Image: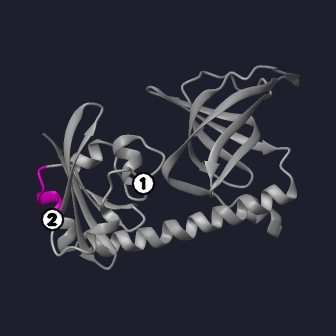
Amino acid sequence: MSFVDNRRNFRVSLVVPIQGKARIASVNHTEIKMDKYFPISILDFSASGMKINALLDLPVGKDIILESVFDFGDKNRVLQGVLVWKEESYQQRIYGTKFINLSEKEERQLVYDLNKYQLSKTKLERTKCSYSESPAAKMIYAIPYPAVLLTAEKKIIAANDLSAKLGASPGAKCYQVYWNESKACSFCMLGEAHRYNGIISNTVYIKNKKYIMHWLCLGKKIFLHYWRRV
């Protein structure tokens, strides 16, 4: 197998599925001139294709080309892929797509960003392992509210059961899983937490509901964050 084949087949499983959208670009070589998109979740992908989850029921074997739009590696991607396989289970449809019309430059950039993501993922997993049995990890399970351990970049290292039920998982950003935001919350005080010897708190209102947020710097750029509704 050539180096090009190897790099195209280098597949990355995503810590948190990437949310995007897709549309049917063509069926049986007939272009579909409609901009009607449907939501997708990208589970893993390589420079040659990706695995997605979608609610829409699409037939396999009709030479369907999907145009997918999503953010990855700080860039907005618009990639086309032919539908090659499908798996169905309860309330879930998983599809495999093979990229087409991908230029050599686009492929090189995609391989670079995939490698960068994999290195970041490996580093995060090592950090997670080092903290999984730490007193800090045990602390969040003793807190009767949604609680997580965060890096300075607001990435989750560990989550207690209440946070996990809300979708918190290692690698995700806290503001994404808690409040479905694309950027850090305006009320976040994590950046100031390292200046305090104890817990720093903030009372906020989100959708007319009152919450008290807490942050605590545990050292080595690791932070405890928990909140409660009042």
Residue annotated with mark 1: 172
Image location (x, y in percent) of residue 125:
42, 68
Tell which circle, 2 or 1, labels the residue nearer the N-terminal end. Answer: 2
Q: In this view, does 50 lie above or below 84?
A: below
Q: What residue type is labelled 2?
A: Met
The one nearer the camera, 72 or 206, is 206
Q: In this view, does 96 lie to the left or right of 144?
A: right
Q: Which amino acid does label 1 sit on?
A: Ala
The N terminus - image quarter: bottom right
Residue annotated with mark 2: 139
Which residue occupies the extreme bottom position in the image?
Answer: 220
- Please say whether residue 144 is visible from this viewpoint: yes
The C terminus - image quarter: top left
Q: Do the residues labelled 2 and 1 touch (CB within 8 Å)?
A: no
Crowd around label 2: few <14 · some 14–19 · many ≥20 (10 Å): some
Residue name at image x 51 percent, y 46 percent: 17
Image location (x, y in percent) of residue 185:
38, 50
Task: Name the quadrant containing residue 90.
Answer: top left
Q: What element carries label 1?
A: loop
